[in-house]
């Protein structure tokens, strides 16, 4: 009997355990050994639901953060246009320069964290500088959008923690499955010794490692992911009505082209620095 490891697919373990339970039941004389394993299969379903929910939550959180990143850039550009008009189209005007010491279009090319840092002084400046009604309204739009952006970041942080918790439950399930399987194997080996059966008798109840490597259903491609830290996103078009997804980068393309045995050797710090969608694929291949 081989031992489940980090490389053993999530669905592979389930199918493997179902085989063992079914074989024990078919033997009749060993059906009592199947009951603990059968109960453990029930926990697989619950853990799988937790993993699915955590994955879905992170996908939604990433999408919301990206939408807010684009929206913040749009709101800042709108305020910049109103303020520049009020300053006579003079970018060197003291009022304009206090709000925008650097070009506003740069906000469209940075992460939401850097956007929030760059615009953090706006709430203070709003109390120090008298603006026209149009400019004040545009500034309120920036402040409202940045607050929504902070909330989106907070939700993404919680989503990554949910991924961590689900991953830990998955690892615990795997370890407990190994323990239960070893107990069943020991009992079967003892039975074989007592009844002078072939030494390979216990192995009949467990799939071979080769069989466990057969292609699994697509559902098995879901990764057991470690938490992904928020990472820099490539630039997006600034049309607020068109949601966009992160394009691949040259480095991401190179990483995804690597064979599985090389992916296993990548340092975790390196993987965590990749775009979130690339991390998902890499972690799936490392756990499949």
Image (cartoon, helix red, strand yellow):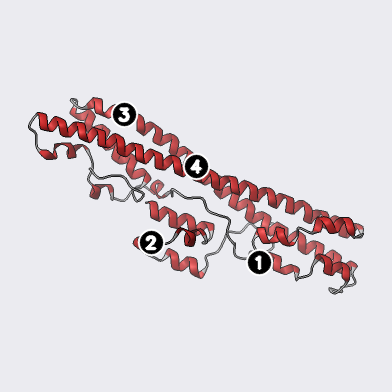
| Residue shown at the point (44%, 65%) measured from the top left | 255
Do the residues bearing badges 2 and 4 touch, measured as CB atoms within 8 Å?
A: no
As drawn, the residue found furthest toward the left would be 196
SS under mark 1: helix
Q: CA distance from mark 4 to mark 3?
A: 24 Å
Quadrant of the image containing the N terminus: top left
Do the residues bearing badges 1 and 4 touch, measured as CB atoms within 8 Å?
A: no
Residue matched to label 2: 265
Q: CA distance from mark 2 to mark 4?
A: 24 Å
| Mark closer to the chain start, 1 or 4 | 1
| Residue shown at the point (24%, 33%) measured from the top left | 184
Q: Is residue 152 left or right of residue 12?
A: right
Residue 14, placed above or below residue 80: above
Residue 38, horizontal then vertical, whole percent: 32, 30
Residue 250, horizontal then vertical, whole percent: 50, 70
Q: CA distance from mark 2 to mark 1?
A: 32 Å
Do the residues bearing badges 2 and 1 touch, measured as CB atoms within 8 Å?
A: no
Residue matched to label 4: 165
Residue 191, horizontal then vertical, whole percent: 14, 30
Residue matched to label 3: 36
Residue 243, placed above or below residue 97: above
SS under mark 3: helix
| Residue shown at the point (49%, 68%) measured from the top left | 251
Residue matched to label 1: 109
SS under mark 2: loop
Nearer the observer, 9 or 181: 181
| Mark closer to the chain start, 4 or 3 | 3
């Amino acid at each position: 009997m081989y031992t489940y490891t980090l490389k053993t697919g999530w669905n592979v373990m389930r199918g493997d355990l179902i085989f063992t339970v079914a074989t024990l039941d078919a033997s009749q004389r060993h059906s009592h050994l199947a009951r603990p394993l059968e109960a453990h299969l029930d926990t697989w379903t619950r853990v799988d639901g937790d993993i699915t929910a955590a994955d879905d939550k992170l996908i939604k959180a990433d999408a919301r953060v990206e939408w807010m990143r684009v929206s913040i850039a749009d709101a800042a550009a709108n305020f910049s246009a109103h303020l520049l008009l009020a300053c006579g189209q003079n970018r060197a005007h003291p009022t304009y320069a206090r709000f925008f010491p650097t070009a506003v279009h740069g906000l469209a090319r940075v992460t939401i964290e850097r956007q929030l840092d760059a615009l953090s002084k706006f709430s203070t400046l709003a109390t120090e500088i008298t603006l026209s009604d149009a400019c004040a309204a545009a500034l309120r739009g920036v402040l409202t959008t940045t607050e929504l952006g902070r909330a989106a970041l907070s939700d993404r942080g919680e989503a990554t923690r949910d991924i961590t918790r689900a991953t830990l439950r998955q690892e615990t399930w795997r370890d407990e499955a190994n323990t239960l399987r070893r107990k069943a194997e020991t009992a079967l080996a003892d039975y074989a010794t007592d009844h002078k059966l072939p030494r390979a008798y216990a192995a009949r109840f467990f799939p071979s490692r080769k069989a466990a490597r057969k292609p699994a259903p697509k559902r098995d491609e879901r990764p057991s992911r470690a938490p992904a830290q928020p990472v820099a996103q490539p630039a997006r078009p600034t049309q607020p009505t068109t949601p966009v997804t992160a394009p691949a980068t040259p480095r991401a393309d190179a990483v995804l082209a690597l064979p599985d045995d090389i992916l296993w050797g990548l340092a975790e710090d390196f993987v965590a620095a990749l775009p979130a969608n690339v991390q998902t694929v890499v972690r799936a291949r490392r756990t499949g």
